Each structure stands twice: as structure tokens, then as C-alpha cells.
Amino acid sequence: MRIELLRSLVPALLLSAATLFAACGDSSTTAKSTAVSKPEPAKAPLIQKAQVADWCPEHGVPESACTRCNAKLIAQFQAKGDWCKEHSLPESQCIACHPELEAKLKAMAPKTGG
Ligand SMILES: [Zn+2]
Ligand SMILES: [Zn+2]
């Protein structure tokens, strides 16, 4: 009987096909070994960028001599007699009393690019 023969063959073929696929599938199980490493955080430079010029742009005087930013300096200027009580500024910085200082201070100001 031919049909009987076919019926018994089909399961065998399917089985062999299944084993083939299984064999193929095995090869795709190779684990991906891409080590995901965290990017190194940018370390802060040990040496700071070039210090900004000793200048207080807000008050137009050297930062190291800016009594409005550093009240501690006031006593030093007063001790030197370099003090304008009227304007609470060192005479050497008091443009109100010494208008010519404005040009002098402007010349001292660092050139800011831009
Ligand atoms: Zn200042
Ligand atoms: Zn003054």
C-alpha cells in the first residue's frame, strides 16, 4: 500500500527537518561579548584655567582693590589716607572727584574678547 508507506515516511521527514533546524539554531546562541563599559567622566583639570585678570568689571577697578567687593580693603585705603568719605571710595578710584581717573581705569581694564 503506497499511502501507508507515505504516512510512515512523513513523520520521519518532519523529524529530520526539525533536527536540522535545531542544529542551525544552536549556532546562533553565541553570546554577544560586547563589554559595555561606562564612559570615563571627564576629570577636572588639576590646573585651573588661566586666572581671570585682577579686575572687577562691575566696579571698573582692580578686583584686589575693589572696596565694594572687599570691604576689608576699606581700612587699608583709609589708613593710607586714600579715601573719599563723600563717595565711600578710595580717592584713587573716585571718578566723581577725579574724572580723569575714568580714562586711567579704563586703560587698566583687561581687554575682553568679543
Ligand atoms: Zn567690585
Ligand atoms: Zn569722591
Image (spheres, grey):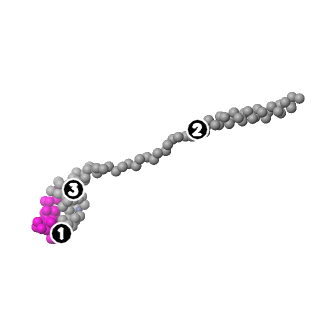
Q: What is the magenta range?
A: 74-103
Asked if residue 24 lies left or right of residue 112, the reply is right
Whether the magenta-drawn stretch holds residue 85 is answered as: yes
Secondary structure of the residue carrying numbered label 3: loop
Q: Residue at x 12, y 68 (%)?
A: 79
Sequence-first tag of 3 and 2: 2
Amino acid under disc 3? Asp
The Cα atoms of the two marked residues, 1 and 3, are separated by: 21 Å
Secondary structure of the residue carrying numbered label 2: loop
Specify the farthest residue to the left. 81
Using the image, tell me which numbered label, if any, was put on residue 110. Answer: none
Viewer-side label of 1, 3: 3
Viewer-side label of 2, 1: 2
Asked if residue 12 lies left or right of residue 85, the reply is right
Secondary structure of the residue carrying numbered label 1: loop
Q: Is residue 60 visible?
A: no
Expressed as whole percent of the image width and height from the top left, the position of residue 96 reads 16, 65
Residue that label 2 marks: 30
Residue nearest the observer in this picture, 19 or 64 = 19
Expressed as whole percent of the image width and height from the top left, the position of residue 2 reads 86, 28
Q: Residue at x 69, y 33 (%)?
A: 20
The Cα atoms of the two marked residues, 2 and 1, are separated by: 79 Å
Residue that label 1 marks: 88
Q: Give the quarter of the figure containing the N terminus.
A: top right
